[in-house]
Image: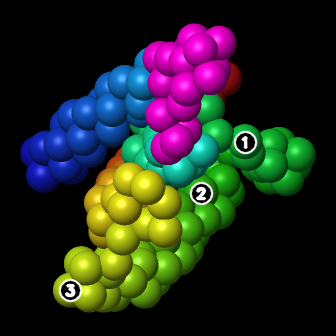
Amino acid sequence: MMFLKSMERISMLLNRIGAVIAIVLIIYMLAHILLEIALRFFGQSTYILDEYIGYAVATMSFLGLPYVLEKGGLIRVSLLLERIPVNKRWPLEFFSSLVTAGCFLWISTFWLQNVQRSFSRGVVSETLAETPIWIPEGAILIGMWLISFSLLVRALKILMLRSQYLPVAE
């Protein structure tokens, strides 16, 4: 039980760090868009708005996802869950968490190869900024690992605390 609490604390800390980075990216996007608007009044541009906003949206999405999962903010198919008796829900919750974590981990293995390839080949964006592509790809990879870790901790918690799914005697 102590192991579970430790893993949960680590997961919550990492999720909060991801959420803070996502918030900072939202603020950055706002500032960059406002700067671009101001510059265009003078016929100027940063020339990187589309590229960097795209990187920020992707990174924000993946880094913010674990925190949203932790807070129960993800869309769930409660239509199905509501029809299942309370004491029978934990296997479905456990299975869905495990399968989803497995899918993210599987996808992340291919994404890791992509990040490594981009880094080793020195791949840069085809814009004036020539951004090393491994940087935004690496941020997305970290988000994939965070959501996988959160889902695995969630599955472990469901398995360890499945007795809470038993109906309470009235």
Is disc 2 placed on a helix, strand or loop? helix
Residue linked to disc 3: 120
Determine the CA span between mark 1 and mark 2: 14 Å
Mark in front: 2 vs 3: 3
> Which residue is at 53% across, 50% downward?
51
Identify the disc placed on residue 75.
1
Q: Amino acid at mark 1?
A: Ile
Res. 105 in view = no
Is disc 1 placed on a helix, strand or loop? loop
Q: Is residue 129 above or below residue 40?
A: below
Q: Badge 2, how many Cα within 10 Å: few under 14, some, many 20+?
A: some
Measuring from the top left, give residue 100's x and y in whole percent. 55, 68
Is residue 147 shown left or right of residue 91? left
Determine the CA span between mark 3 and mark 1: 38 Å
Between 58 and 19, the residue placed more toward the observer is 58
Residue linked to disc 2: 93
Is residue 1 shown left or right of residue 110? left
Between 121 and 47, the residue placed more toward the observer is 47
For marks 2 and 3 on the same chain, the one whose residue lies earlier in the sequence: 2
Q: Which residues are magenta?
A: 29-49
Q: Is residue 63 above or below residue 92?
A: above
Mark in front: 3 vs 1: 3
Res. 52 in view = yes
